[in-house]
Image (tube, rainbow, N blue to C red):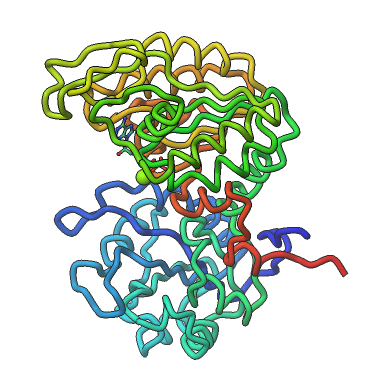
Amino acid sequence: MRLRTLRDLPVQGRRVLLRADFNVPLQDGHVADDTRIRATLPTIQWLRDQGARVIACSHLGRPKGKVDERLRLAPVAERLSQLLGVSVRYAHDIVGPEAHALARELGDGDVGLLENLRFDPREEQNDPEFAAELAALADCYVNDAFGAAHRAHASVVGVAQRLPSAAGFLLEREVTALSRVLEANDHPFVVVLGGAKISDKIGVIKQLLQRADAILLGGGMANTFLKAAGYQVGRSLVEDDHLDTASSLREQAAARGVQLLLPRDVVVAPSLDDSAHRAVVSVDAVPADAAIFDIGPETVAAFAAVIQPAALVVWNGPLGVYENPAFREGTRGVAQAIAACQGYTVVGGGDSAAALQELGLADSVDHLSTGGGATLEFLEGKQLPGIQVLMEHDA
Ligand code: ADP
Ligand code: MG
C-alpha cells in the first residue's frame, strides 16, 4: 500500500478542494498563532504553481453544527492572504451559493476559502449528501489536515471517496515520519513518555514496546508506575485503577528486554500553587503531604545519557507540569537532550509540541508532529480513516 501524493494528481486548470487544518487560536477577530496556516503553505504554493484553482476548507473550534459568528473563517482568509501575498476569496457558506460562485469564478492559481465546515452538522456525521455537495465544488481533492485524519468526517473521508484524491505535503511528511517510528528499524530506539495520565497512553506504550530498546517515563503517568512498584507517592496524581496496567506493562518490557526507566528523583511541593516550598527528593522519600510535579536533575541526567547515543527518539508528553516555570526544568532538560541527539527525533502531542515551542527548540528536532489525537492514534498503530482513504491498493 502506498499513499497517493500530490505528484500523482494532475491539477493544472482544475478545481482542487484542499482540506486544511486551519483550526487556529483567534484573538479579537484575528489569528493569534498562524503556525497551522504556515504549515500548509508549501502545498498551497505548489498547487498554485501548477495552475490549480484552490478551494481551501477547514473546521475551526467546536460550533456543533450551527453558525457561530465567533468561529467564522474570515480571520483565516485575511491571514492566508497576507502570507500568500494575494487576495484569498472568502465564501460565507460551505456548499451554498457563495461557495458555488467562488468555485465557478476562481482562475488558475487563485485561492478561495469556504466557511467553517462544522457549521453544518452533516460534516461530523460524514453525511453522504454533504460529501457529495462538497465534491460537486471541485474536480479533485487534496488532504493536508493531519490533525483531523483520525476523524471519519465528510471533508476527510466522504469527499475523498468521491473525487480523485491525494495527500498534501504536510500529511505526507507526517505519515513518513511517524511510519519511521512505528517501523523502527533504527536502533537504539528510545521512547520518552510523560503527560498527565497513563490511561491516555496505554495504546502507545503497548505498540512502541514491541520495538523500543528503552522507554523513559516521567510526568504524571510515572507516578502510577512508581506506586505500582511500591513507592509512596503522597498526594501525587495517580490512577489507582491502572496500577495493574502499570505492573503488566513493566512485565512486558522486562520480558522483551526493553529497558524501562522510572524517575529516580522528583520535584515535590505541597501543591501546584505553593512552588516556593518545592524540593528535590529521592523517589523513596516523597513526603506524604506533598505531590510530584516534575522529574529531578539526577533523572534528567540519566534520561539524557540514554537519549544521547539513540538512533531514533520519539517523545510524547511533558515530564512535569511545564506550564508552571517552577516545574519546567525536567521537560527542558529532556527536550535539550533530544534536540542535541544526532539520531532521528520525533516529537508529538499537543502539549509536548507547545512545550517545545515555548522552550524555543521546535526547530531542533527532525519532526514536530502537528496532530494531537491523530499523532497518538497513529503511534498506537491504528489505521486513520483520513489516511486509509488516500492509500493506493496494490493490484
Ligand atoms: P500531550 O498533549 O503532549 O500528549 P498530555 O496531554 O498527555 O501531553 O499531558 C500534558 C499534561 O500533563 C500537562 O498539562 C502537564 O501539566 C501534565 N503533567 C505532567 N506531569 C505532571 C505531574 N507530575 N502531575 C500532574 N500533571 C502533570
Ligand atoms: Mg495534551
| Vertical comparison of 230 with 41: above or below | above
- Taking the spot 24% from the left edge, 67% from the top edge, the residue there is 71
Residue 28 seen from this side: yes
- Is 309 in front, or is 220? 220
Residue 81 seen from this side: no
- Taking the spot 21% from the left edge, 74% from the top edge, the residue there is 68
Image spot of residue 8 (x, y percent): 73, 63
- Is 58 in front, or is 276? 276
| Vertical comparison of 37 with 209: above or below | below
Figure label count: 0
Q: Quadrant of ligand 1?
A: top left
Image spot of residue 33 (x, y percent): 30, 46
The image quadrant that residue 230 belongs to is top left
Image spot of residue 103 (x, y percent): 47, 81
Image spot of residue 255 (x, y percent): 69, 30
| Vertical comparison of 112 with 232: above or below | below
User: Which quarter of the rendering shows the N terminus?
Assistant: bottom right
The image quadrant that residue 186 belongs to is top right
| Vertical comparison of 208 with 383: above or below | above
Residue most extreme to the right:
395
**Image side of residue 5 versus residue 386, left or right:** right
- Taking the spot 75% from the left edge, 33% from the top edge, the residue there is 185
- Taking the spot 41% from the left edge, 9% from the top edge, the residue there is 298
User: Which quarter of the rendering shows the C terminus?
Assistant: bottom right
